[in-house]
Image (cartoon, rainbow, N blue to C red):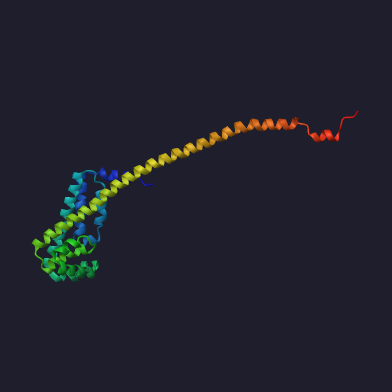
């Protein structure tokens, strides 16, 4: 069984400010156009969340990750406002998939700023929606609150899952460790009991067999008396 708690201990031994900075950088990379395709930000957040042990650490990490994710969205929004519809023809969007761009544009036309919030929880689309929002001409005062709410919910979800997974893994390993010792003790007791039972059986059945053998040797068969009757 892998030593899960040992791995979490190693992560927890890192300076906490460094863990926070790394979580923020990964969130920024995940939510920035192009980098989100290369950096597994959500997986990193789950691992970082597993190292959280206190409430203030949890709240601090959620705040930093949400802020960095929102900053990545704002950078994408600025690119959309700066280059307009030409962004759809760029190599980055082509690599990510123009169908995702079209999906983000459709969501923005139908739901407006609500699409910015919803897209935060959709892979790939979340990195293209801020750019598409800037291209569509959405005003920044509508874009920013939706992005901030979506980023906060996204950070809360993944860090919360990571924290729960880390706590559950440690608890599960502790329980399994105790059960292993109980099973080991039970097997040992069964083994000792079997050895003692065999010794007891040998002590009690050995003398009995010897007595039975002596009795058989000393007994005279009655058939001998009938075959050789005493002479007068």
Relative to 71, residue 99 above or below: below
Q: Which residue is pictured at 72% across the width and 31% down the height?
A: 215
Residue that sits furthest to the right in the current view: 232
> Would residue 40 be found to the left or right of residue 141 on screen?
right
Q: Position of residue 132 (x, y in %)?
A: 16, 67
Closer to the camera in the image, 130 or 226: 226
Q: Position of residue 168 (x, y in %)?
A: 30, 47
Residue that sits furthest to the top in the current view: 232
> Would residue 201 be found to the left or right of residue 178 on screen?
right
Residue 42 location, quadrant: bottom left
Q: Which residue is pictured at 82% across the width and 34% down the height?
A: 224
Q: Position of residue 68 (x, y in %)?
A: 16, 54
Q: Position of residue 79 (x, y in %)?
A: 13, 64
Relative to 19, residue 102 above or below: below
Closer to the camera in the image, 203 or 150: 203
Q: Is residue 33 visible?
A: no
Closer to the camera in the image, 169 or 202: 202
Q: Is residue 188 visible?
A: yes
Relative to 133, residue 40 above or below: above
Q: Which residue is pictured at 83% across the width and 33% down the height?
A: 225
């Amino acid at each position: 069984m892998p030593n899960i708690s040992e791995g979490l201990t190693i992560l927890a031994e890192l300076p906490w400010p460094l863990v926070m900075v790394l979580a923020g950088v990964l969130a920024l990379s995940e939510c920035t156009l192009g980098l989100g395709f290369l950096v597994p930000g959500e997986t990193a957040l789950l691992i970082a969340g597993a190292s959280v042990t206190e409430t203030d650490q949890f709240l601090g990490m959620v705040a930093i990750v949400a802020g960095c994710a929102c900053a990545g969205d704002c950078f994408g929004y600025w690119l959309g406002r700066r280059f307009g519809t030409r962004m759809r023809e760029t190599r980055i969007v082509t690599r990510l998939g123009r169908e995702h761009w079209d999906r983000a544009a459709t969501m923005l036309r139908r739901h407006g700023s609500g699409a910015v919030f919803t897209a935060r929880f959709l892979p790939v689309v979340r990195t293209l929606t801020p750019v598409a929002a800037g291209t569509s001409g959405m005003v920044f005062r509508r874009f920013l609150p939706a992005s901030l709410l979506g980023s906060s919910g996204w950070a809360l979800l993944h860090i919360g899952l990571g924290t729960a997974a880390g706590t559950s893994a440690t608890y599960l390993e502790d329980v399994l460790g105790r059960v292993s010792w109980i099973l080991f003790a039970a097997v040992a007791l069964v083994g000792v009991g079997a050895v003692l039972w065999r010794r007891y059986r040998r002590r009690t059945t050995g003398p009995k067999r010897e007595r039975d053998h002596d009795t058989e040797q000393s007994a005279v068969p009655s058939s001998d008396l009938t075959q050789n009757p005493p002479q007068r």
